[in-house]
Image (tube, helix red, strand yellow):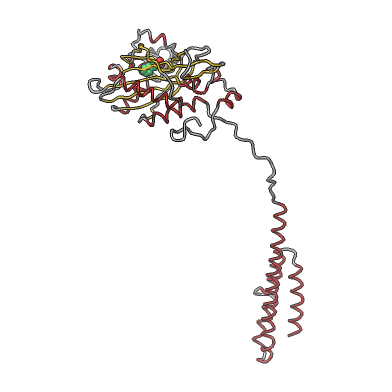
Amino acid sequence: MMDAIAELRKRYLAQVVGAPDPDALETVRLAALGKKGEVSLKMRELGRMTPEERQIAGPALNALKAEIDTALRARRAALDDAALDARLRAEWLDVTLPPRPRPRGTIHPVSQVMDELTAIFADMGFAVAEGPQVESDWYNFDALNIAPEHPARQEHDTFFMHRAPGDNRPPHVLRTHTSPVQIRAMQDRGAPLRVIAPGRVYRMDMDQTHAPMFHQVEGLAIDRNVTMAQLKWTLEEFCRAFFELDAVELRFRASHFPFTEPSAEVDIRCAWVDGQLKLGEGDSWMEILGSGMVHPHVLRSGGIDPEQWQGFAFGLGIDRIAMLKYGIPDLRAFFDSDLRWLRHYGFAALDLPDLPSGLSR
Ligand code: PHE
């Protein structure tokens, strides 16, 4: 028996040390210590031995089992270490490689300005309202007190949509201003009301300062005691906050819009210095908005009783104020999709403007 044990010991310890990988090692383990392994079978023979024989063979077999087990563990650890070393050598990262290029996209100045003015008006309690760009004739004109024969219809250089042949209803239009959103907001939300409506508008017009598609933001405030003074205050506060300048100067000129009475156009003082627009200085004035007290007919179109409520409204050219604030000389470049222009005038994608951290950082 003791010879057999010595032989097993020699053979299995050699096999353990020689196992080239974890699978081979497991095969060795099963052959020695598995249920039907040679060492296990030997242990079963103990039952058939005399007590004397067993006293010698029992401890010897236990010692053999423990020794092989220890050798197996040591070999497994060595194989694992070698495997890890091999992985570390194979899977490496060259941290000296240059980083990936920065994302190229930027926020268009028009989007930036919309975010900025939304932040300013939100702070004054204005919610954002929206309306369709393809608008019905009624919302774009009639509801705003622009009758079919009114000259303002021609002045608006309207783009008309097609109607099916034989359909004699007035065609839809590409909205010529954001004012139809006044009507929709009144109908949807009722009074009192404070909304702005930024968005695209369309007129058949194209030169250095006009594009057939441009952007306006409409403002509308309706309450029981709204006055022209509040309109002026609101616009001045807005301009100060938007242009981030205390010295902005506005000029209110009496004007006429069918949907406001009285009406005022508002200009901002500016100068051209070396081809760049400068604000709050110089002798030039740039018209930036139209405004006035909401006409009673318009309130009625929106389902609001003009005996109970008054309102002020304004419409502001977003592209204009973007040019003024950021010194952009040519309006047409806004819509050329020229990557060099966008990289120069665009804004970082994740810097959302808000009042506490500064609008244009
Ligand atoms: N809708 C007018 C325009 O496009 C601007 C405006 C809006 C004027 C609201 C007065 C009140 O010219």
Quarter holding residue 242: top left
Question: Quadrant of the image for the N terminus?
Answer: bottom right
**Residue 42: percent from the left, percent from the top?**
69, 81
Quick check: which quadrant has ligand 1?
top left
Q: How many marks?
A: 0
Residue at screen point 70% across, 75% down:
68
Task: Tell me where residue 261 appears, x and y as whole percent.
Answer: 31, 14
Residue 172 visible at all = no
Please state the horizontal and vertical placement of residue 299, each as a whole percent of the image: 29, 20
Percent across and percent down for residue 228 are 31, 19
| Front residue (pair 61, 95) | 95
Q: Nearer the viewer, residue 297 or 271?
A: 271
The vertical placement of 326 against 12, above or below, is: above
Could you say which is closer to the camera, residue 110 or residue 66?
A: 110
Residue in the image at 56% along x and 19% along y: 333
Residue nearer the viewer, 47 or 207: 207
42 versus 334 height, above or below: below
Whether residue 70 appears in this view of the structure is yes
- Residue lying farthest left? 307
What residue sits 52% from the left and 23% below the top? 326
Where is residue 317, by image quadrant?
top left
